[in-house]
Image (tube, grey):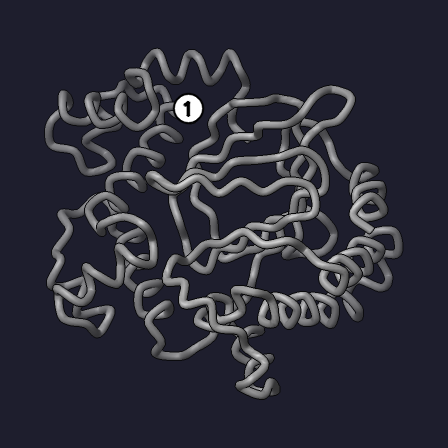
Amino acid sequence: MIEKICDIVKTYAADDVIMDTAIPSLQIYRTSQENVKIHTVYKPSVCMTLQGSKDVILEDEIFNYSKGEFLFTSMDLPVCGRVVKASTDLPYISLVLNIDTTDIFEIQKSMPVYELKSSRRSRAIFVEKMGASLSDAVFRLVKCLDHPVDIPVLSPLIIREIIYRLLTSEYGDVVAQLGVIGGKTQKIAKAVEFINNRYTEKLDMKGVAKIAGMSTSIFFKNFKETTGMSPLTYQKKIRLQEARQLLISTTNDAATVGFMVGYESPSQFSREYSSMFGLPPKKDIQLMKKQNAFA
C-alpha cells in the first residue's frame, strides 16, 4: 500500500520543496539531498515517510522514521531534520498532515475510554509504523488529489478517520492529550504559544507558569518532560531559528539581527548561533545559499 500511495504522491511532488496540495492540511516533501540539516519548528502534525529515511533531532534525542513509518508531534517543537536516505533515483518522499486539535476532541467524545492505549510516554513526539488501517486511509486521502471535486466532501471525513487510527495506535494516549481541554499537553502548548509570540522578550518563568496554570516547579518539570528541553532552551532555539530566517531574507548584519530577536550582546548571539548551527552567522548563510538548504 505504501508503494501505491507513493506512486500517486510522486505525480504532485517537486524536488527539494515542501508543497501545499489541494487538500488544505496536507503537504508533500521530496528531496534527493542527504544529510542537509534543516532547522525548523514542527507544528502538531503527522509526517509519513513513503520513500527513504529521515532523522528528526530534538535536543539529544534522534527520531528516525523510514518507509512505512510516521512521526507525530503534538505541539510546536523546534527540531533539526536531516534526510539520511535519498538519491536522484530514489528521492526521499513524505506526506505532512497538519492536525486540528478540535478534530481530536470531537473524535474522542465518540470513543470508549478503553479503546485508548496507554504508553505512559510524556514526550510530545513519537515514531510508529503506519499499519494497514492507517495506510488504507492515507491512500484514499491522496486519491482525492486525482479527483479534486471529491476533496471538499471526502477529505475531511478521511482525515477524521486518520486521526481515529492515530488515537488507536500504540501511542494513542499521546495523541489524545492534544484534545483534552485543560490537560497537561494543552497547558504546555499554551505556554509554548506564549513563548513563540514573545520570543524577543526576557522570559518570566513565573508568568509563563501562571499562564499554564501550574506552579513554577511543576511547570518547569512538565515543560521539560513534554518538549525535551527547558523553557529557556526552547526560547533560545526559537530566537536563533528566527534570526537565521531574518539573515536569509534581509540585508541586516548579524549584530542587528541579534538585537531584533532579543539578544543584548552580539558576541553572545554569535556564540550561541555557532553552537546551534555549526558556523558563525555570515558563513552559515553563505553555505545555506550555496546548498539551497531552505526546504
Query: Mark 1: which secondary structure?
Result: helix
| Residue 10, picture quadrant | top right
Residue 68: x percent and y percent? 70, 47
Residue 12: x percent and y percent? 79, 39
Identify the residue at horizontal 30%, vertical 28% (top origin).
276
Q: Is residue 230 above or below residue 160?
A: above
Q: Is residue 187 above or below residue 124?
A: below
Residue 256: x percent and y percent? 22, 25
Residue situated in front as seen by the camera: 293 or 167: 167
Identify the residue at horizontal 26%, vertical 63% (top origin).
222
Residue situated in front as seen by the camera: 140 or 52: 52
- Quadrant location, the C terminus: top right
Residue situated in front as seen by the camera: 25 or 221: 221
Question: Mark 1 Cα within 10 Å, few/some/many (few <14, many 20+)?
Answer: some
Which residue is disc 1 drawn over?
Answer: 248
Q: Is residue 255 above or below residue 135?
A: above
Residue 63 horizontal side relative to residue 14, left or right: left
Inspect the image, locate mark 1, and give the three-letter code of the amino acid beneath it: Ile
